[in-house]
Amino acid sequence: AGLGFELYQNIPNPWVNKTTIGFHLPEAARTTISVMDAAGKLLYTRTADFGKGYNQFVLDASQVGQQSSSLFYKVSTETDADVKQMIRHE
């Protein structure tokens, strides 16, 4: 059995300008990446097709606005989803 769906901690964390979110898909899938603030307000979302295996997505500070401190990111497919926390500094 290979790896299943996995969401990895963003690197670097905490981050200022850019951070990379890595995830592993057991099969190619249409995948949605969402970023929320601590209150659950959606700041950014993108859906795209990603391949089987390791994928990564670079999040730029301009995409989440001037939000500082605690953010959450969610990566979801039709069959799997996971959420992790990240810290952003101005």
Image (spheres, rainbow, N blue to C red):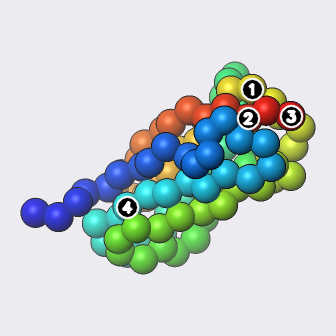
Marks 2 and 3 in Cβ contact (< 8 Å): yes
Would you name the residue on which mark 2 appears? 88
Residue 55 got which mark? none
* Callout 2: SS: strand
The image shows residue 87, relative to residue 26, as above or below, that is above
Please name whichever residue, 89 or 46, is drawn nearer the observer in this view of the structure.
89
Residue 90 got which mark? 3
Q: Check disc 2 and give the amino acid type.
A: Arg
Q: How much space separates mark 1 and mark 3, taking CA atoms?
A: 8 Å
Image quarter (top left, top right, bottom left or bottom right) of the C terminus: top right
* Callout 3: SS: loop
Q: Position of residue 82 (x, y in %)?
A: 43, 43
Q: How much space separates mark 3 and mark 4, taking CA atoms?
A: 29 Å
Q: Could you tell which of marks 4 and 2 lies nearer the N-terminus?
A: 4
Tell me which corner region of the image, top left, top right, bottom left or bottom right, holds residue 42.
top right
Q: Check disc 4 and give the amino acid type.
A: His
Marks 2 and 1 in Cβ contact (< 8 Å): yes
Q: How much space separates mark 4 and mark 1, taking CA atoms?
A: 26 Å
Q: Is residue 37 left or right of residue 28?
A: right
Q: Position of residue 85 (x, y in %)?
A: 56, 32
Q: Is residue 80 left or right of residue 15?
A: left
Q: Could you tell which of marks 2 and 1 lies nearer the N-terminus?
A: 1
Q: How much space separates mark 4 and mark 2, taking CA atoms?
A: 23 Å
Would you name the residue on which mark 4 appears? 24
Q: Check disc 3 and give the amino acid type.
A: Glu
Q: Could you tell which of marks 4 and 1 lies nearer the N-terminus?
A: 4
User: Residue at left 35%, top 74%?
Assistant: 52
Q: Nearer the viewer, mark 4 or mark 2?
A: 2
Crowd tier of the residue under label 2, counting other residues whose Cα lies within 10 Å: few below 14, some 14–19, many 20 or above: some
Residue farthest along the left direction in this orientation: 1
Q: Is residue 89 left or right of residue 70?
A: right
